[in-house]
Amino acid sequence: MATINEPADEDLMLHYKNGDSRAFEQLYLRHKAPLYRYMLRSCESKAIAEELFQEVWASVIGARASYLASARFTTWLYRIASNRLTDHYRKHGKWDQYIDNSDENDEICAISAAYEQPEQKADIHQQIQRLLTCLEQLPALQRQVFLLREEAGLKLEEIAKTIESSKEAVKSRMRYAISRLRHCMGSL
Amino acid sequence: MNETDHNMHDEGISRIYQQSRIEEPPMGLDSAILTQARNAVETKNTSWRGMRWMFPLTSFALVMLTATLFIQMKQEYPEILEPSSVTSPALQVEERLDDVQSDLRKRKTTVNKEQTEKRDAAGASSPAMEMKSAPAEMEVAPAKNLKMMSKEPLKQEVMGTSPFRSRENLSEADSAAPSQPELLKGQASPDPEAWIVKIRNLLKQKNRDEAIKELETFRLVYPDYTLPDDLKILNK
């Protein structure tokens, strides 16, 4: 993310809109890795993730003329990414799997209470692998809100705007995502 | 309930996840996206300043294209580009005019010869006036008569079906023209007065048939000319 001395994402995007390709390079370097991981962990394969990643940036390039700095650039970028994912799942008939939401699973909530801190059990590399495995097992919408916070650094309100949902729904998904991850990490 | 709620945020999970953030897009993907971004704005910013090479390149391409077409045309249709193989209509007219002029010169020489003979035979009395005036008229006449004589053939040539008629074809067409056959053969007199003198001379030489024939030709060329009384007898 931009520090005090660096130009804001929105300014860079406006510069790019006016024909400065260096501004885009800066913007890309800032956001490429988080966005790539967001796509990578939301898709079933690396190849698809890379394809969708490129499509997202192509959309940014194509939509530069209509970009308005009224919203945060990150929110705009991840909204494009989320829409791409949604389109992808719909196109390949995996929409039901994508929206599978087990928020009302009380069993998970109960188990989460018995969760132990993962670092007590294994070394860091094993813990990372466990977490990523658990993340894969999360319902897509819960994984989405978790990744938007961890990768994009978005607040709950911004996540709600990005995925065009209510703040309460986002809170609920986040709560269940954390519970499931705790349960999963403890049980592995 | 705020975002730091235990149920919505787990420091341990978050820390582990942050350590997992090592994947990055492949370099090929980076360069493809950056190139796409660069091309998108460069295409928009393309101006004449950036296309200074366009004019010389276009000129060179034009010259090459013209040369190629010329060579190809020369190979496939040599008769179009070879000036000696086909006579243009203008050249044909010029040649016809040359023919007529040379014909006139011959006729003038003949008339002069006849007049000289006549003068020698009859002495230098009243006919001398006619003899003197005739050559003068002959000198003046060619331009006017050439114009008159060449008018119809020229018209025919220009209005003809093919603009690339050969000389042979032209001669055939000329001989086939019914309106002024004698004229086209170069036998018509360039000047009516000189012609009349010639016909009179033929009469004086007792060559009546030849005079009648000459008069008929004269009538074909000058149908509106009012004949002198002495020649009206022949025109019956």
Image (cartoon, rainbow, N blue to C red):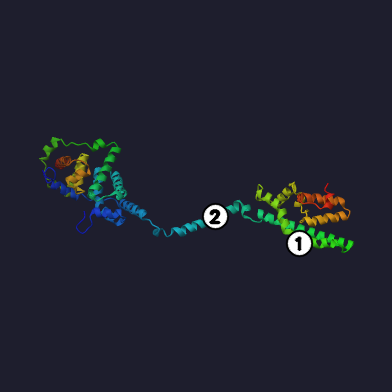
If the image is split into quadrants, where does the C terminus of chain A sit?
A: top left
Which disc number belongs to residue B229? none
Q: Nearer the viewer, residue B168 or B73?
A: B168
Q: Is residue B169 visible?
A: yes
| Amino acid type of the residue that numbered disc 1 sits on in the rendered structure | Glu
Q: Is residue A88 above or below residue B22?
A: above
Crowdedness of circle 2 by 10 Å Cα count: few (<14), some, many (20+)?
few
Residue A116 is left or right of residue B33, and the answer is left
Picture coordinates of residue A12 (x, y %)? 26, 55
Q: Is residue B59 above or below residue A139?
A: below
Mark 2 vs mark 1: give the one in front. 1
Which disc number belongs to residue B139? 1
- Residue lying at the far front of the rendered structure: B229
Q: Secondary structure at mark 2?
A: helix
Q: Secondary structure at mark 1?
A: helix
Q: Nearer the viewer, residue B152 or B78?
A: B152
Q: Chain of mark 2?
A: B
| Amino acid type of the residue that numbered disc 2 sits on in the rendered structure | Thr
Q: Nearer the viewer, residue B10 or B5?
A: B5
